Image (cartoon, helix red, strand yellow):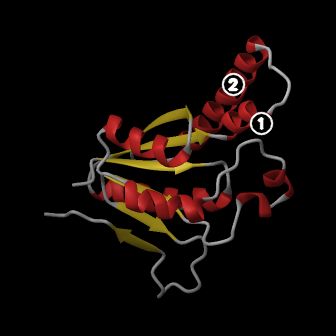
């Protein structure tokens, strides 16, 4: 049923909480994971700069940021045991890039952690505050639930007790 699961990550600990859930689902259905990082802030930087940018500098910056994201996802993928893992890094707007990746990879589920309303990954650790890639998964996750062509499994950022479920399946089309 869930042969390929897309897991959007942004480098934050909160987003990474979706990984164990996605891995468990993938193992249960003999599926595989696609780890995705969407880099959107570079687009905003290019549109907001007042001085014309040197195309070579922009290209070099994009290459370095994409390479760093691939390296990060590669390290994450090495830590995932028991399932096959693909990685992908895209430049673009998060919702559109996530839905597009799900369609291109033939994913049957998107599993992501929701930061929750008003929470940004920049509000976390000192490392997070200086991270060049930022997107909020409160509003993003809500928009993905509505735009996704496949079911979405939302993982809550904090589980208060073991009895309380930590994930909610939305938009499931199981039949």
Does any portion of residue 84 appear in the rendered image? no
Give the image location of residue 104, x and y in percent.
Answer: 34, 34
Q: Nearer the viewer, residue 20 or 108?
A: 108
Residue found 63% across the figure and 62% down from its top: 14
Disc tally is 2
The quarter of the image holding the C terminus is bottom left
Does any portion of residue 37 appear in the rendered image? yes
Q: Which residue is mark 2?
A: 62
Q: Which residue is mark 1?
A: 48
Q: Nearer the viewer, residue 134 or 86?
A: 134
- For residue 122, what is the image quadrant? bottom right
Left or right for 23, reference 12: left
Secondary structure under tag 1 reads helix
Query: Farthest residue in the front direction?
Result: 50
Left or right for 150, reference 70: left
Give the image location of residue 142, x and y in percent.
Answer: 48, 64
Secondary structure under tag 2 reads helix
Query: Farthest residue in the top direction?
Result: 56
Q: CA distance from mark 1 to mark 2?
A: 16 Å
Residue found 40% across the figure and 45% down from its top: 99
Residue found 56% across the figure and 36% down from its top: 92
Asked if the residues shown at circle 1 and circle 2 are in contact, with their CB atoms under 8 angstroms apart, the answer is no
Q: Nearer the viewer, residue 91 or 47?
A: 47
Q: From what the image shows, is residue 61 above or below residue 72? A: above
Q: Residues within 10 Å of mark 1 (few under 14, many from 20)?
A: few
């Amino acid at each position: 049923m869930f042969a390929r699961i897309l897991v959007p990550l942004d480098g934050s600990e909160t987003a990474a909480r979706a990984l164990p859930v996605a891995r468990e689902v993938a193992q249960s259905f003999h599926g595989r994971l696609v780890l995705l990082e969407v880099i959107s802030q570079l687009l905003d930087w290019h549109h907001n700069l007042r001085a014309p940018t040197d195309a070579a500098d922009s290209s070099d910056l994009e290459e370095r940021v994409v390479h760093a994201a691939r390296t990060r996802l590669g390290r994450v993928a090495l830590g995932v045991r028991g399932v096959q893992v693909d990685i992908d890094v895209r430049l673009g707007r998060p919702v559109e890039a996530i839905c597009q990746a799900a369609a291109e990879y033939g994913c049957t589920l998107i599993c992501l952690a929701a930061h929750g309303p008003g929470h940004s990954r920049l509000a976390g650790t000192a490392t997070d505050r200086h991270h060049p890639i930022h997107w909020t998964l409160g509003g993003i996750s809500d928009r993905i639930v509505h735009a996704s062509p496949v079911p979405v499994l939302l993982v809550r950022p904090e589980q208060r007790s073991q009895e309380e479920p930590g994930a909610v399946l939305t938009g499931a089309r199981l039949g």
